[in-house]
Image (cartoon, rainbow, N blue to C red):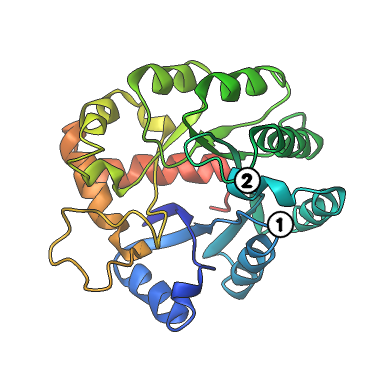
Amino acid sequence: MLIDIGANLTHDSFDRDRAAVIERARAAGVGRMVITGASREHSPKALELAQAYPGELFATAGVHPHHASEYTEECDIEMRALHAHAEVVAVGETGLDYFRDFSPRPLQRKAFERQLQIAVDLAINGVGKPLFLHQRDAHADFMAMMKNFDGQLGPAVVHCFTGTREEMFDYLDNDWYIGITGWLCDERRGAHLRELVKHIPANRLMIETDAPYLMPRNLQPMPKDRRNEPMYLAHIAEEVARDRGESIEAVTQATTDAATTFFRLPG
């Protein structure tokens, strides 16, 4: 069964049919999902959703760089409280985004640093809590900040990878994981990923939908509302398998094993 490592199921576009979305994913072979927490508002909601589907849904808790302006002392306390729950399996979504700059860059860096410290403080047997990371147009600062915590951090995944060959190998050289989405299917912006995905070691490759965003552009038939759903993870897995020259069974096994190990999931 596939694992979707990044689904924004707390998004209001799912309010009308969230249970049906989860059922459709289940029917399409998506056995487990990690619900992304990316703000003060949605991280608690991700936990609530994971608690409603024990063993099937899990959550992250963090503040996306778009929302870095909301990262106060009170927010830090709230995030740490969320991480006391077993269902919260990673710190993030956190990182840097200089493409949009929805929050000032100094505040992005401050919020990122605070959340890296949370991951360090929550170490189990000396290994920091997994990190669910975002980076866009901020590679140099991103790498420098991660370097500041060298030797203290646990496993990290750069989710929704859309970057360059050089960026990807920087991540892999640090033994970080790579999350691949339907961006791979975008012939306008993601064609380079078709080649790059071949070079990701099987034990560092994970897949995700980032639903409701990033609907695979080559999906047929295309849903009229163009809302991405976790059930389309199977399509992404098929595309990855084709590009890697592997069977769908091999990609399913590898990505499921990688996600289970990374997030320390039961089973």
**Mark on residue 198?**
none
Q: Nearer the viewer, residue 99 or 126?
A: 99
Tag 1's secondary structure? loop
In percent of width and height, residue 139 lies at: 51, 23
Residue assigned mark 2: 92
Tell me which corner region of the image, top left, top right, bottom left or bottom right, holds residue 2.
bottom left
Q: Label 1 neighbourhood size at 10 Å, few (<14), some (14-19), many (20+)?
A: few
Residue 99 left/right relative to 185:
right
Give the residue at x 66% y 22%: 145
Query: Which label lies toward us, 1 or 2?
Result: 2
Q: What amino acid type is highlighted by mark number 2?
A: Gly
From this view, report whether residue 124 is shown above or below residue 143: below
Give the residue at x 45% y 39%: 258
Q: Are marks 1 and 2 in contact (CB under 8 Å)?
A: no
From this view, report whether residue 227 is shown above or below residue 161: below
Residue 79 left/right relative to 242:
right
From this view, report whether residue 52 is shown above or below residue 166: below
In percent of width and height, residue 37 lies at: 61, 56
Q: What amino acid type is highlighted by mark number 1?
A: Ala
Q: Nearer the viewer, residue 262 or 209?
A: 209
Residue assigned mark 1: 86
Residue 223 left/right relative to 18:
left
Tell me which corner region of the image, top left, top right, bottom left or bottom right, holds residue 101.
top right
In percent of width and height, residue 103 lies at: 63, 44
Q: Earlier in the sequence, mark 1 or mark 2?
A: 1
Tag 2's secondary structure? strand
